[in-house]
Amino acid sequence: MNEEEIKIDGFHALSDHLKTKYCTFGYPEQKIDVIPNIIDDSFLIPHQSDFESPYRLLYVGYLREHKGVQMLPEIAARLKQTDLEFQMTIVGDGPMMKGLKRETKRTGTTDCIEFRGHVPYEELPKIYAAHDLFVYTGVWEEPFGRIFLESLCAGTPVVGTNVGAVAEIIGDAGSTTDPDPEALVKKIVQVLSTDTLNRFAANTKQSVQQYSRDTVEPLLEEFYTSVCTGDQ
């Protein structure tokens, strides 16, 4: 694809990762502006957990294979073999719910995993804030997941898979690793066994400032104005 074939004046990419993808598809780099999603201010609430053992781990999302949720029971089983005390909450529904519950019984993790199912959106901020660490298991190229902003707004750090724009979004308020249970468990243990968790937690509120309405809206206005006036 060459620039003469492209009849669009400007492209809006949600992340640097997505911009790079657009460029590999042949879209001209100079026509792509990176402008992220805006945080929902209702998630900007005081954090409620104490970041101490027993640690409360959280997953929020649709229960489908590309979200990597099939790894959660194994992650819990591996964590039970360590010295860490923890509880894991799984929030969300989807086609893998029954299979996950079966796997939880098979791995002997029913005592440390709670399935909350679908939770109304307005109740999510308090759930994030009540947990010590958000665990993301996605295995697909995540362009820009709002769940990361929601977690950070509530003061909850993130450990996740290094796919798509995850590392870019969470910045200094979390850490990423390979998308497999062993690597995720190793990273979770590393974070929870040191003062790293408190350091990540201290960075959460600052990390989301770049996604505030006051920061992002002017970028959107500038982008669409430049496209309409032909300055792009």
Image: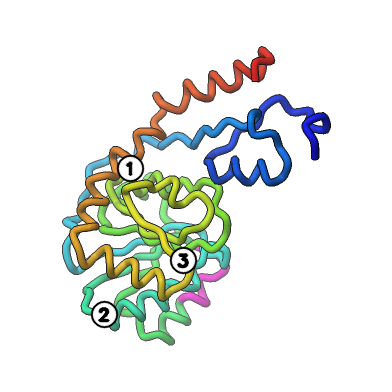
Snapshot quadrant of residue 42: top left
Q: Secondary structure at mark 2?
A: loop
Other-residue count near label 2 (Cα within 10 Å), few / some / many at <14 / 14–19 / ≥20: few
Identify the amino acid type marked 1. Cys
- Give the Cα distance between marks 2 and 1: 30 Å
Q: State the count of labels.
A: 3
Q: Which tag, 1 or 3, sits closer to the chain's start?
A: 1
The image shows residue 67 at horizontal and vertical percentages of: 52, 62
Cα distance in 3D space between marks 1 and 3: 25 Å
Q: Nearer the viewer, mark 2 or mark 1?
A: 2
Callout 1: SS: helix
Residue tagged by mark 2? 82
Q: 151 or 81: nearer the eye?
A: 81
Picture residue at 58% right of the left edge, 22% below the top: 223
Q: CA distance from mark 2 to mark 3?
A: 20 Å
Q: Is residue 9 above or below residue 104?
A: above
Residue identifier under label 1: 153
Q: Nearer the viewer, residue 149 or 16?
A: 16
- Residue at image mark 3: 178
Q: Residue furthest top?
A: 229
Which residue type does callout 3 highlight?
A: Asp
Q: Quadrant of the C terminus?
A: top right
**Residue 96 in the figure: left or right of residue 10:** left
Residue drawn where x is 50% and y is 49% of the image: 165
Q: Residues within 10 Å of mark 3 (few under 14, many from 20)?
A: some
Answer whether residue 57 is magenta in the image: no
Which mark lies nearer to you, 2 or 3?
3
Q: Which residues are magenta?
A: 93-100
